[in-house]
Image (spheres, grey):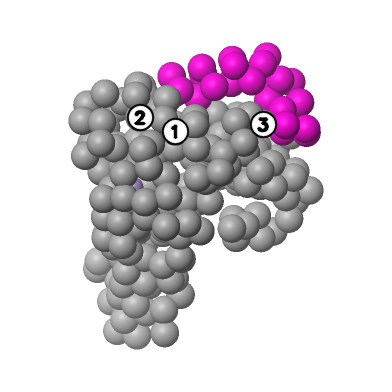
């Protein structure tokens, strides 16, 4: 019995070309994302064994494994839906208004998000999140798959800055990768996540 399953992509592996190649998409989804799903299920199974045996000698490793792999599963599940081959170019409506309110302008938001994403030291993600405590949008740097973000913040838009996400296409030129990302953002998906997060919907992460 597995708790987590690899979701299908909402488009073909080649659909995001020329911005992201089919080769990267296939590896990224079928190998990397699948490894996170398997790793999360494996951590849960080993925790069950530990409880059964009453032996928690390895619990620190297992908790770290669960955080890393479940983080990877959630992050990629969101990321795929944040992208679309039919990008409409710019945020509209309530999302556009909120970006203006909390970042000054859409352009200023994009500059901040780009800077935060490109500045990540090591592997991680740039993330636009809804913070229910301050009732506002914030930008976070997510380290690895699970670090450096506050509990309870709800991710709306994520950019994978791990080298596996871009190196085959862009080598070390992160700026070109991020510029390509902006051309394939699914703003409708971000808007749906924003509306759900702001209304407190409990199933926000499940939006596809
Ligand atoms: Mn990735």
Q: Is residue 79 visible?
A: yes
Q: Which residue is drawn at 31% across and 44% down?
A: 21
Q: Is mark 2 on a helix, strand or loop?
A: helix
Q: Name the residue under label 3.
A: 91
Percent position (x, y) of residue 38?
32, 69
Label 2 near label 3: C-beta < 8 Å? Answer: no
Q: In which quarter of the image is the C terminus?
A: bottom right
Q: Report the residue at 25% width, 66% height from top.
A: 58
Q: Can residue 68 be seen in this view?
A: no
The prevailing secondary structure element of the residues shown in magenta is helix
Q: Is residue 142 above or below residue 78?
A: above
170 left or right of 143 in image: left
Q: Nearer the viewer, residue 188 or 34?
A: 188
Q: Earlier in the sequence, mark 3 or mark 1?
A: 3
Q: Where is residue 20 in the image (x, y as percent from the top left)?
A: 35, 41
Residue 153 occupies which quadrant of the picture?
Answer: top right
Task: Left or right? Give the position of 202 relative to 156.
Answer: right
Of 113 and 175, nearer the camera is 175
Residue 128 lies, in percent from the top left, at 56, 34
Instruction: Identify whether 168 is placed above or below 58.
Output: above
Q: Horizontally, is 57 left or right of 68 in the view?
A: left
The magenta stretch spans residue 36: no
In depth, the one of 67 and 8 nearer the eye is: 8
Looking at mark 2, is its residue's CB closer than 8 Å to ligand 1?
A: no
> Mark 3 and mark 1: span between their CA atoms?
14 Å
Does ligand 1 reach within 8 Å of label 1's beta carbon? no
Q: In which quarter of the image is residue 91?
A: top right
SS at circle 3: loop
Q: Name the residue under label 2.
A: 177
Q: Name the residue under label 1.
A: 181
Start-end of magenta stretch: 92-117
């Amino acid at each position: 019995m597995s708790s987590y399953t690899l979701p299908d992509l909402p488009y073909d592996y080649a659909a995001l070309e020329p911005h992201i190649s089919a080769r990267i998409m296939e590896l990224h989804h079928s190998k990397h994302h699948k490894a996170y799903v398997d790793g999360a299920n494996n951590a849960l199974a080993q925790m069950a064994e530990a409880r059964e045996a009453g032996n928690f000698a390895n619990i620190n490793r297992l908790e770290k494994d669960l955080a890393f792999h479940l983080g990877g599963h959630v992050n990629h599940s969101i990321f795929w839906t944040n992208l679309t081959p039919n990008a409409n170019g710019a945020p509209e409506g309530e999302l556009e208004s909120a970006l203006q309110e909390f970042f000054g302008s859409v352009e200023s938001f994009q500059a901040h998000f780009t800077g935060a994403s490109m500045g990540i030291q090591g592997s991680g993600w740039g993330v636009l999140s809804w913070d229910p405590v301050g009732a506002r949008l914030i930008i976070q740097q997510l380290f690895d798959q699970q670090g450096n973000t506050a509990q309870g913040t709800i991710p709306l838009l994520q950019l994978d800055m791990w080298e596996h996400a871009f190196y085959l296409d862009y080598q070390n030129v992160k700026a070109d990768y991020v510029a390509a990302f902006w051309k394939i953002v699914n703003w409708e998906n971000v808007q749906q996540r924003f509306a759900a997060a702001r209304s407190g919907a409990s199933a926000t992460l499940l939006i596809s």
